[in-house]
Amino acid sequence: MALLKIRNLTVSFATSTGPFKAVDGIDVDIEPSEVLAIVGESGSGKSVSMLAVMGLLPDTATVTADVMEFDGRDMLSMSGAERRRIIGREITMIFQEPIASLNPSFTVGFQIEEVLRINAGMSKAAARARAIELFDAVGIPEPAEKMRSYPHQLSGGQCQRVMIAIAIATNPRLLIADEPTTALDVTIQKQILDLLLDLQETHGMGLILITHDMGVVAETADRVVVQFKGQKMEEADVLSLFEAPQHPYTRALLSALPELATGDRLPTVSDYFAEAGQ
Amino acid sequence: MSIVVEGKGLTQDYHVAGGLFRPSKTVRAVKGVDFAVERGKTLAIVGESGSGKSTLARIVALIDRQSGGTLRIEGEDVDIGTGKPTRALRSKVQMVFQNPYGSLNPRQKVGEALTEPLLLNSDLDGPTRREKAEAMLEKVGLQRAHFNRYPHMFSGGQRQRIAIARALMLNPALLVLDEAVSALDLSVQAQVLNLLADLQEEFNLTYVFISHDLSVVRYIADEVMVMNKGEAVEQGSRDAVFTDPQHPYTRQLFAATPITDIEAIRARVARRKAARAAALA
């Protein structure tokens, strides 16, 4: 059974010039312990669709879906209280800017202990012990000392490790990572991606990776969804997608990679849409 | 081939002020860098955050004065600390920044942004300035009618085209591009890289291209300089650096860069399948 099953998800925003559809009829399926990459450029609705699942969109957004099930439970009909038991415990999320995702006024130790006390019902001492364990598991050196650090005292890579530790603190079934390495240097990016895949493998979590970077997709995903302007262009397992991309937009994205350039000019997306007559 | 820009032993120090219980200290952000770029060529400077690549870019673009070493532009020693650069020198070097949302004044029409460098650095009259600006808009793939619009009416890629157009208004010899395509989507990035290649050919421009993205560097560079913690750890032609990197840091950078090679993906998928089968057994 699919861990998360979504059918015909639509998100529209009320704007001064009328409603704007950011996500237009997206279907998403993710199996337990699968890595799904959602790829797209800005405005493709890749983040918005996952924020809709998490219930993190502002009031100006209208979310509709025919089906939204997590682990067989219908998320559309459940009460807010039931939903909150899933969100943040069984489904967790990390974001692009790790330093901005943490509260600057509290130590990182306090922030992870808070999650453990509220979501896992631990005592203060138990939460502290577990937090140190988690910091160690995500590769933070001197975890006990780092508990007393404020976010600004840590590097971007270390803050993202703290975010990951908080996200896996409740042993979630599904982790959604929204551009988790975009703000980081490549050598740090590699460490964080390796960490995410390692945790995914050992905990058997589902992992949804939202990214714009085809290289990241190639090195992490089992299955890939390509989105463009709120619609799904193509869905395939990672090898077929890179070997034989079916949709012109996917072909365009792959050929716009500077590393694959042949000759002097890079093909652009409009070249491909012209070819496809769209 | 003439050398357009040359740096010898360039250093840059930043002074960090002390507090009540903390002594002041000096941070050397660039630790003696040598380079030279020929006319019409592109030098790419690669490095991670804190490598000093943007600090170096600001020295080359005559924004900051170097703490030590010499900078030569078209054979002339330049030191902006000892005298205000002349109009001619200012015209020779222009810069394009990473974020086109931040580098254009939102309350200034595109046309004013483009004509302002001419107003300050040339003696051309109004109609001539306007004509030059409209012609430049066409050159960078926009329309003459865009002259009277404001920056918010354009997409990120179009704004970066405007920033490039403004940098070219004074017919510079050297363009310093600091992460100029990093904020753009992949497909838009391809268009802007194509535009830069076309403009380089047409105006015989020299580029100093700062980037953290090795795949972009591989596409655009003639010469590559890899920086780490203020030092140039490796320098050479693009082919030499990419096919046979010498310094361990360069190799580390290459190893960390995600690649989209089919064989690598096939191997990874097979590894994962095997690991799963082993876990089930």
Image (cartoon, coloured by chain):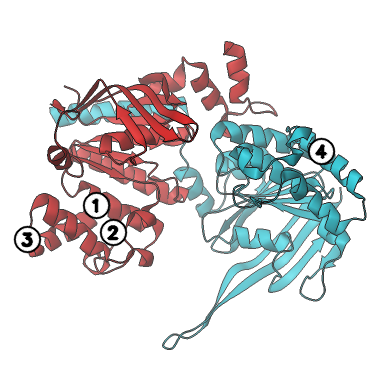
Chain colours: A red, B cyan
Q: Say if mark 1 contacts mark 2, CB within 8 Å.
A: yes
| Residue at x 30% of width, y 41% of height | A56
Q: Say if mark 4 contacts mark 1, CB within 8 Å.
A: no
* Residue B86 circle label: none
Residues marked 3 and 4, same chain: no
Residues marked 2 and 3, same chain: yes
Q: Secondary structure at mark 3?
A: loop
Residue with the mark numbered 3: A123
Q: Amino acid at mark 3?
A: Ser
In front here: B176 or B101?
Answer: B101
Residue A108, given in percent of the width and then of the height, sits at: 27, 62
Q: Report the chain holding disc 4.
A: B
Q: Report the chain holding disc 2.
A: A
Q: Amino acid at mark 4?
A: Glu
In front here: A39 or A75?
Answer: A75
* Residue B134 circle label: 4
Residue with the mark numbered 1: A165
Q: Which numbered disc, 2 or 3, marks the residue that appears first in the sequence?
A: 3
Please indicate whether residue A102 sits to the left or right of residue A85 in the image.
Answer: right
The mark lying in front, picked from 4 and 1, is 4
Q: As drawn, which residue projects farthest toward the bottom? A: B20
State whether residue A138 appears in this view.
Answer: yes
